[in-house]
Image (cartoon, grey):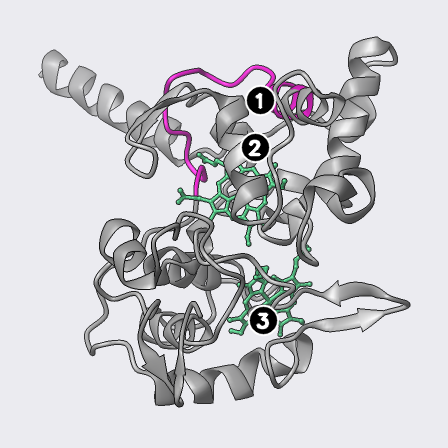
Amino acid sequence: MKIAILLFLVATSAFAAEEKTFTPPAERDIPKNEFGDAVRLGKSIFTDTQHFAKKYVGNGLNCSNCHLDSGRMADSAPLWGAYVRYPAYRAKTKQVNTFEERLQGCFEYSMNGTAPKSGTPELTALVSYAYWMSTGAPVNTKLKGAGFPKLNKPELAPDYARGQKVFTANCQICHGSNGEGIKVAGKFAFPPLWGKESFNWGAGLHRIDTAAGFIKGNMPLAKGGTLTDQESWDVATFVMSHDRPADPRAKTGIAAAKKDFHEENCKYGETVEGHVLGE
Ligand code: HEC
Ligand code: HEC
């Protein structure tokens, strides 16, 4: 009997621990010293990459366009969920990467730019911001809310035409009828989903499964969780059936890069509406 009660307590407390999302420190608690200055600069770079890390950026995006609420939001690959899990082995690079290397990858692919070298003020500031965000978090563990949600395989094969309908009804108003985003006073108020100002074919978000999870969790903005899984897969397929900047890894052509780096359901290298994606 005693053992049963004990087991019950252990089980419920483990469950409670798993259910709680980590809360990063409040912005007003950034220390007022040299370290705090680096943290604040990191936050500025993260939310206005266009301005604060301009020379490393080759598109119209900011880090926080995909890592929402300045990298705080659960299920939007928050910085506090990331920092404590590096160094880590990554299938993409087939090696153990440091946190700095992970950030450099985002510049090359998600920002379609060039990676700031280790030790540059920009990279150091971003690391400081992420380190501060994870103050008090347990290390070497996947916190609840870390990464983007993973969706189960859809019931029906994801479909371009159904996705187009979802896009017209739920996304176009903010992201534009051609996915080009909307600029106000020369700056994107609503970021582009495809085209030359968007992330490139090497970015994590171009993967349809990753995009479906991001969309399900976060889009339409402030209405995350309202689309069905099927709608999320369909609209992700539609978005990723449009062209975007070249895959920097495609040194010997699209066919080779498709084989080496892309999933079988990825539209890269396929002909959609008369155009070969990736060209
Ligand atoms: C176009 C969307 C997009 C933009 C812009 C973007 N990222 Fe990411 N980021 C992603 C995706 C997708 C992942 C991969 C998540 C996964 O592996 O499932 C990721 C992963 C990360 C990770 C690791 C997260 C983890 O939990 O392991 C960090 C850290 C990160 N990004 C930082 C940045 C920084 C810094 C910038 C700006 C310089 C940036 N990202 C810009 C989409 C983006
Ligand atoms: C109410 C306006 C609004 C609607 C509707 C909306 N989005 Fe977004 N979306 C945004 C904003 C704003 C961001 C950037 C978030 C930030 O910077 O905080 C964003 C970011 C994104 C991103 C990551 C950044 C990028 O440019 O790739 C994707 C992908 C995305 N939205 C897809 C969608 C899809 C698909 C739909 C429809 C299901 C949708 N959005 C509906 C406003 C919206």
Can residue 22 be seen here?
no
Q: Is mark 2 within 8 Å of ligand 1?
A: yes
Q: Dot 2: within a 10 Å radius of its alpha carbon, few (fewer than 14), some, or many (20 or more) residues? A: many
Disc on res. 134? 1
Where's residue 57, x and y in %? 69, 46
Residue type for callout 3: Gly
Q: Dot 3: within a 10 Å radius of its alpha carbon, few (fewer than 14), some, or many (20 or more) residues? A: some
Residue type for callout 2: Leu
Magenta region, mostly helix, strand or loop? Answer: loop
Q: Is residue 262 left or right of residue 241?
A: left
Q: Which residue is mark 2?
A: 79
Residue 267, image quadrant = bottom left
Q: Is residue 199 left or right of residue 39?
A: left
* Residue 183 sits above or below residue 117 on the image: below
Q: Are marks 2 and 1 in contact (CB under 8 Å)?
A: yes
Distance between the alpha carbons at the discs numbered 2 and 3: 27 Å
* Residue 207 sits above or below residue 20 on the image: below
**What residue sits 28% from the left and 76% below the top?**
158
Disc on res. 195? 3
Task: Say which element carries label 3.
Answer: loop
Q: Earlier in the sequence, mark 1 or mark 3?
A: 1
Distance between the alpha carbons at the discs numbered 1 and 3: 34 Å
Depth check: 257 or 267 in front? 257
Residue type for callout 1: Ser
Residue 255, image quadrant = bottom left
* Residue 262: in magenta span: no
**What is the magenta range?**
128-147
* Residue 27 sits above or below residue 72 on the image: above
Can residue 169 be seen here?
yes
**What residue sits 67% from the left and 16% below the top?**
119
Residue 70, image quadrant = top right
